Amino acid sequence: MAITRKGIKYLCLGLFVAVATAVFFGGDRLAPAARASGAGPVPGVTGAPGEVNCTNCHIQNSGPGQFTITAPASYAPGQTYQITVRHQTSDSSRRRWGFQLTALAGTTPAAVFGNLTAATQIVDGAAGRKYIEHTTAGSFAGQAGGALWTFNWTAPATNLGPVTLYAAGNEANNDGTADGDQIYLTSVTIQPPAVAPTVRSPFDFDGDSKTDISIFRPAPAEWWYSRSSDGGNRAAQFGQTTDRLVPGDFTGDGKADFAFWRPSTGFWFVLRSEDGSFFSFPFGTTGDVPVPADYDGDGKTDPAVFRPSTLTWFISLTGGGTTIATFGAPGDAPVPADYDGDGKADIAIYRTALGEWWIQRSTAGLLAFQFGSPTDRPVPGDYTGDGKADAAFFRPSTGEWFVLRSENFSFFSAPFGTNGDVPVPGDYDGDGKFDFGVFRPSVSTWFVNRSAQGVLIASFGQTGDVPVPSAYVP
C-alpha cells in the first residue's frame, strides 16, 4: 500500500518532539498512536544519545527562531533548580509551540522534574529516562513571537559528573499539518559540584593531617618537633637566631617544610621535607612582614610579604606571576587565611587600634567588622569545620578565646590558658577543626583543647624556645 503524505505526517507524530497536526496541533482529540503521551510528544525524541527526532518530516533549525535552555552553571547534589525553555522568533507565521526535554549524566538518567504550571507534564520513557514536555494548554495556540516554560529540576542526590539537558522544540505555523514547522535541537551542560579544596592542618611536618607540637631554638637555630603520627621526635639545624619563622608546604607534598625569612636580606630559605635539601631566593626587603600562604589554591605555600611602609602586599605565586595589592592602614597586622572557603588564602588585616577585621575575600569580596580590642591577639582559623577560616582572638589578660563563626557571624568564647601563655592554634587531632592551644614558656608545657580528643598536656621545649605554631600570630 502506498504511503501518502498524510500518512508520513502521522507516522512522524509517533516519534517527533513537537507533535504536529493531530497530536501537537490537531485539537484536543489525539491520534491513537500518541494518545498515551497526552497532548505532548511520545517519549524519546529530544535528540539525546540513543534517541531519535523527526527532522525527516520537519525542517531542522530553519528560519530566524531561537530555542534555548536557561539552567544553572553547576549543581549541588539534591538541590532543586528552576529551568526555563524558551522559543523566540521574529517570524510572525509561527503560531504554536512545543518542546520535550530530558536530563542525562553521560547515559545515566538524571531527570527528576516538577511541574510549576499546567503548561508542562512529565512522562516516562525507556531505560528509566524521564521527560518534561508541553501540554495542550502549553502549546499556546495562536500566540506569536515565542513561548517559554519554567519547571523544577532536582539534581542527582550524589555527584554524577556533568549533567546535560537535551531538548527539541517546534516552532509551528498552526496550520494543522507538518508542512512549514521548524524543529530546533539544543542542549546545555550543568557542571558537577566543585571538588572541595583539600584542607591541610597547619604545621603538619609528618603529613598525617595533624598539627605537630614543635619549637624553634634560637641560639643554635634548631627546629624540633614531636611527630603526631608515631610520637617520635625529629630535629634539624636550619637558620640563624634572628631569622623569622615561615614554615609551610612550599613543595606541595602534604608536609610542612622548615623555612625562614631573613629580614636583613629579604631572602627565603626552605628545607625540603622530601629529602632534606634546601633552596633559597630573594623576595622582600628589610621592614617587610612575611605572610606566606596558599593564595592561588594549588596546594603550595606562596612566599609573600606585607610592606607596612606602603601598605602593599607582594605575593609570589607558585603557579606563576606576582600579585601586588594595596590593602591596609598604618598599624594594621596582616592576618591572611581562607575566609571564604575557596581553597585560596585571602588578603586580610586586623586593625589593632579599633579591633576591626578587614578581609579581601578572593571569591566573596570585601568584608569588614569589629571583633576584638587593641590588646587581643588575632588567631584566625577554621574552628567550626565548615571549610572557612573564622575570625578569632586570644585575650592574654584573661586567657579567653573568642571565635566569630563564619557560618552566621555569631560568636562563642571559652577560657583556655592564662596570662603569659603563647597562643598556638592548629588542628592537633586532624578532625578539620582548629583547636585552642597555648604554650606556657615558664614550664615549657603545651596545653591543647582538642575538639575531638580532649585536652592534651605535653612538656616539649626549654627556656627560650619559640613555639612554631605561633609563627603567624601577630
Image: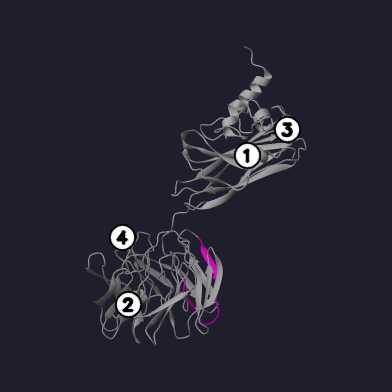
At label 1, the amino acid type is His
Q: At 49% from the left edge and 37% from the top edge, which residue is drawn?
A: 129
Q: Which is nearer the eye, 357 or 269?
A: 357
Q: Quadrant of the N terminus?
A: top right
The answer to whether mark 3 and mark 4 are in CB contact below 8 A is no
- Give the CA separation, mark 3 to mark 2: 80 Å
- Mark toward the start of the polypeptide (4 vs 1): 1
Placement of 250 over or under 187, stated as above or below = below
How dense is the environment of label 3, judged by Cα within 10 Å: few (below 14), some, or many (20 and up)?
Answer: many
- Give the CA separation, mark 1 to mark 2: 68 Å
- Mark toward the start of the polypeptide (4 vs 2): 4
Q: Which is nearer the eye, 320 or 182?
A: 182
Q: Position of residue 81 (x, y in %)?
A: 55, 51
Residue wearing tag 2:
467
Secondary structure, mark 3, is loop
- Is residue 154 part of the magenta span, yes or no? no
The reply, left or right, for residue 215 in relation to residue 268 is left
Q: Position of residue 387 (x, y in %)?
A: 43, 64
Mark yes or no: residue 326 visible: no
For discs 1 and 2, the disc positioned in front in the rendered view: 1
Residue wearing tag 1:
134
- Give the CA separation, mark 4 to mark 2: 23 Å
For discs 3 and 2, the disc positioned in front in the rendered view: 3
At label 3, the amino acid type is Asn
Residue wearing tag 3:
174
Q: Which mark is residue 274?
A: 4
- Give the CA separation, mark 1 to mark 3: 15 Å
The stretch of residues the image draws in magenta is 321-336
